[in-house]
Amino acid sequence: MLDGQDGRTLTLRRTARRDSEAGWAYEATLAFPEASARTIVYDHGDWLGPFFRELAEAWSGFNGVKECGSLEGQLHL
């Protein structure tokens, strides 16, 4: 879960491994006090984990903007 401001959160929950070649399926939920939105996001192992590892390694800060997104476009961080 990623906490935002004013009660907003983004939660990623692994729902299933599709198969050894297709990767993982995650449920992404964006919640805020007024409403929430949910979708299934597919990770083929090449964007979500490496993105969070890169953020963790840069814990002391970094220049510019860090962003990534799913191949199918369901989630962009």
Image (cartoon, rainbow, N blue to C red):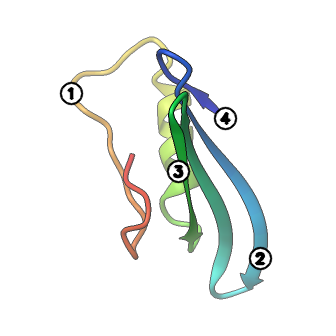
Quadrant position of residue 62: top left
User: Mark 2 near mark 3, Cβ–Cβ under 8 Å?
Assistant: no
Residue 33 locus on image (x, y percent): 55, 27
Left or right relative to 52: residue 12: right
User: Mark 4 near mark 2, Cβ–Cβ under 8 Å?
Assistant: no
Considering every residue shown, the one lying at the far front of the view is 34
Cα separation between marks 2 and 1? 33 Å
Residue 65 locus on image (x, y percent): 25, 32
Q: Earlier in the sequence, mark 3 or mark 4?
A: 4
Q: Earlier in the sequence, mark 2 or mark 3?
A: 2
Disc ID at residue 75 = none
Pick the quarter of the image with the C terminus: top left
Left or right relative to 54: residue 2: right
Q: Which is closer to the viewer, label 1 or label 4?
A: 4
The residue that disc 1 covers is 64
User: Residue drawn at (40%, 76%), measured in percent from left and top?
Assistant: 72
Residue 41 locus on image (x, y percent): 55, 67
The residue that disc 3 covers is 50
Cα separation between marks 4 and 2? 20 Å
Cα separation between marks 1 and 4? 23 Å
The residue that disc 4 covers is 1
Give the residue type at disc 2: Arg
User: Mark 3 near mark 4, Cβ–Cβ under 8 Å?
Assistant: no
